[in-house]
Image (spheres, rainbow, N blue to C red):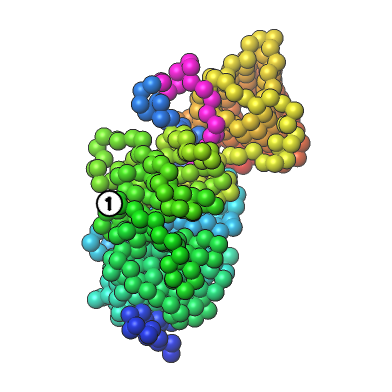
Amino acid sequence: MKNISLMAIAALFIISCSDETTVYSDASDNISLEGNTAVLESSILYDDAGVLVISSEDQISGKTAKGGEEEQAGDYPLTLIARVDAPSYSGAQNLGASHVHVDGDYAYVSYNTVEDSYAGAIDIVYVGDPTSPQLTSRLYYTNADINAVEYNDGYVYAVGGVDSEKSVRATSNSFLVKIPVSNGRMNTSAEMSFGFQEGFNATDVKVTASSVIVSSGKDGYLTSYKKSDLSVQIEAPFADLRSIAVDNGNLAILDGSNGVSFLDANFNAIQKIAIDSDFGNFAKRTLAVSDTEVIVSEGSKGAGIYNKTNGSLKEYLPILINPEGVAQSDIVTNAVAINENVLLMANGGAGLSLSEELGNGADMVGVLDLNGSVNFVASKGDYIFAASGKAGLQIVKLNRPDASLATRCGQLSAYEGNANLTVAKGDTEEYRGSKSFNKITIDGSLLLCGTWTVNNETTVNDGGLFEMNGNLVVGRNNKRKDVTVKENATLRIEGSLTIYGDLILNDGARLEFIGVGSIANIFGNVKKSTSAEINGTFNDIKNKF
């Protein structure tokens, strides 16, 4: 690690009108950056990467069997791209991912500890290339928990709890730090600014065009700092703030003592949604706001969906599983997130669940096969980011088909059928869509246009033809499955082919890449007969050909 020496307190020292909030600049005690490139590189793990199985509500209840003959192909061909291992350093071996914010090609991750002591960290992860995420920067904070983080306009804003008795400058346990960032790397040698406010722990942060809004829970404050210098603009006391959302220039806040309030820019109340739930003590809880609804994580109740206009409860989405060996206190909905029509629930030891918002209610799809206790979830574009405690950050790709691909495939029928796709000899089948399969077996001719995942083997039997335009992912790194192209069979790819297993090309088999920009990402080996042919131009990501 590159240790940063202590800096003197600079001239800026501001006490707010209520004498509760203090701001310092150029304070950097107990902060260090990871300077070892090998540590950063080795923190990106692919052990569990690959096709994610979603256990449906019926499968969890036992109404249907997973992988059974009657199972239908799933609508969500999700893949786990990689996992970012949680940081660890002397005195902090139990850090867990607590929050993630996504901006552009980077994800910003905060870490805290469940121990009585204070310890935390911040990661910046480049996710612009789905085949190769990179941990570009890691900061250690040896006397502070980092509970939430947000990037805006060249700075990371992080909030959490600091041990004020051990800090040379902290006047309270709740704090905000503003850290310069350039090209995905934090810079602690440049000026950093800190703010301290009343409350046991700062719980959330949101950054607007001119302000930084920070909440601190349990007898804390909602504080608006001026973005340029962190001077205090407005502050108001609240009993138990957990989360903040920005909604069309207003704020929505979740208070564990009474529910959701909508505030204007001056913290005047506009609307209240009373919620009588046990939000737990000092526990992560969040809210998400859409055009018509407010979704709230309500602990053991699951997620509550409320009418945004009148505050009425529309429905509760329960936690689907009750895993053995997991404490009941960890089977709670910690956080919620929405991405278009997808609603995600971070359910602690009960995993990450996915539902569809259908306008007239939510349809629960199922639980993703992810490890770790999911503390927080964020989703943007084609990605889901799960802050999974000691398991770190898990990066999931939704694999939605792009608009141009949908246009090219528009004349084909959408696939609606069995999860075990079999094409008989002499038959020709052509489909568009975005589905997850259990397995694919081809004796005839198959064209798939869209995004597809296969949990088990894919086999093109003697003389068969499999054409794929789009994105195909097969297997998982901890459960490898092969793609086999048998004698005189053809596999033709225009797009991206990822195999967590081997690609086997038997006698006379042909592998063809057509078009421009195709990708082959083979995690196993390419086993090619001497009479097999490989034609076309493609990017061999792992140099297996």
**Numbered disc 1: secondary structure:** loop
Q: Is residue 228 above or below residue 38?
A: below
Q: Position of residue 292 (x, y in %)?
A: 52, 50
Q: Is residue 413 above or below residue 175?
A: above
Q: Residue furthest bottom?
A: 11
Q: Amino acid at mark 1?
A: Asp
Quarter assignment of residue 267 = bottom left
Name which residue lies at 48% across and 38% down.
361
Closer to the camera in the image, 64 or 7? 64
Q: Position of residue 251 (x, y in %)?
A: 47, 64
Q: Which SS type dominates the magenta stretch?
A: loop
Q: Is residue 240 above or below residue 51?
A: below
Q: Residues within 10 Å of mark 1 (few under 14, many from 20)?
A: few
Closer to the camera in the image, 252 or 481? 252
Q: Quadrant of the N terminus?
A: bottom left
Name which residue lies at 45% across and 53% down.
310
Query: Is 20 on the left-hand or right-hand side of 469?
Result: left
The question of residue 97 being in magenta is answered with no
Tell me where the magenta segment starts and ends, as one range: 64-86
User: Is residue 149 visible in the rendered structure shown here?
Assistant: no
Q: Position of residue 140 (x, y in %)?
A: 38, 65
Q: Residue furthest top?
A: 426
Name which residue lies at 70% across and 41% down.
403
Closer to the camera in the image, 145 or 216? 216
User: Is residue 498 visible in the rendered structure shown here?
Assistant: yes
Name which residue lies at 35% across and 46% down.
333
Query: Is 67 on the left-hand or right-hand side of 196?
Result: right
Q: Position of residue 500 (x, y in %)?
A: 52, 33
Closer to the camera in the image, 24 or 491? 24
Residue that carries the numbered disc 1 in the rendered image: 278
